[in-house]
Amino acid sequence: MATAKLAKRTKQLNRSLAGNLGVYTVLFILAVFMVLPLVYTLVSSVKPLEEYWVFPPKFTVDHPTMKNYKDLFTMLTDSMIPFSRYLFNTAFVSIVGTAGHVILSSMCAFGLAKHRFPGSKIMFSMVVLALMFNTTVTRIPNFIIMSKLNMLDTYAALIVPAFGSSLGLYLMKQFMDSMVNDSVLESARIDGAGEWRVYWRMVMPMVKPAWLTLIIFSFRDLWNIGSTTYIQSEPLKTLNYVMSQISAGGVARAGAAAAAGVIMMIVPITVFIITQSNVVETMGSSGMKE
């Protein structure tokens, strides 16, 4: 107890009041720059068309209007495919893809982090290497694989690649290494708990910040997925696809495009706000150890 108090006091004395003010000032300035695009998009969505093209751009609006949202709603209702269909496609792909990614990555991470077997380090090195490749690089190989599996023009063409994302496996494995004590798991096994029970009832609650963070990243990517080479059928297209079509309509649709951008931001931002407290904890606990 005395050692903990001494460490706490030493930590408090390491930074002066001026140092704290300096850190908070820098963080505040960075936060302002990060939030400016969101503010500009929101303001632009209620600008009349004559104010939208004012140069230099303004972060304020003189005559706010909801006409942009009305125009967007009219375009969506007049389309051949109902808006509800696009919304369902996006929600279905986002929810199923995120759930499958979290479950599969956590199960694989549990095997790599808490079970020693030949080749485990090589496998994890391959996972780290896979982080270097984004979806653009893997688009052609994924298309070939989806074609061979007859998954083109199906929901699986968007969901299955999300299951195999290397980011989730990396985060979960590193978090389990640092936060899950092997002795606790061994005690549970001695008491008769099987591997599934150890994973689901003990490991998953311990790494809750990690999989909540993973939900944010996975859901954001899947929610914003647009027109892809895997989906050609119009009834299977996503909400982001139809919004991008509206945005490509030229000057006359600029206001509706801004309104579409706000609508696309609402759901990911809501998910982030709900789970944001876990992001910093996860990033601080998932540094590379190997």
Image (cartoon, rainbow, N blue to C red):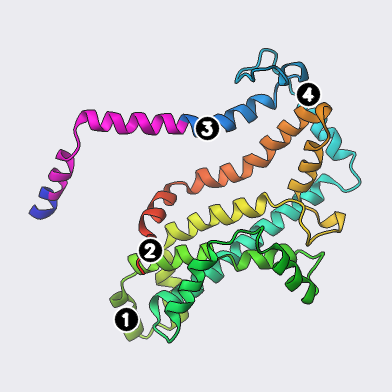
In the rendered view of the protein, which quadrant contains the N terminus?
Answer: bottom left
Give the label, 2 or 1, closer to the camera: 2
Query: Nearest the camera: 222 or 103?
Result: 222
Comes first in the chain, label 2 or label 4: 4
Q: Position of residue 78 (x, y in %)?
A: 90, 39
Q: Which residue type does callout 2 highlight?
A: Met
Comes first in the chain, label 1 or label 3: 3
Residue labelled with disc 1: 186
Comes first in the chain, label 2 or label 1: 1
Q: Which residue type does callout 1 highlight?
A: Glu
* Mark 2, secondary structure of its residue: loop
User: Which residue reaches farthest left?
Assistant: 2
Query: Nearest the camera: 276 or 11?
Result: 11
Q: Which residues are magenta?
A: 7-31
Residue labelled with disc 4: 67
- As measured in the structure, the alpha-carbon distance from the residue carrying label 4 to the one carrying label 1 is 63 Å
Q: Residue at x 38, y 53 (%)?
A: 281
* Mark 1, secondary structure of its residue: helix
Query: Nearest the camera: 202 or 214?
Result: 214
Residue labelled with disc 3: 35
* Mark number, residue 288: 2
* Mark number, residue 151: none
Give the label, 4 or 3, closer to the camera: 3
Q: Which residue type does callout 4 highlight?
A: Lys
Q: Which residue type does callout 3 highlight?
A: Val
Any part of residue 267 in sight: yes
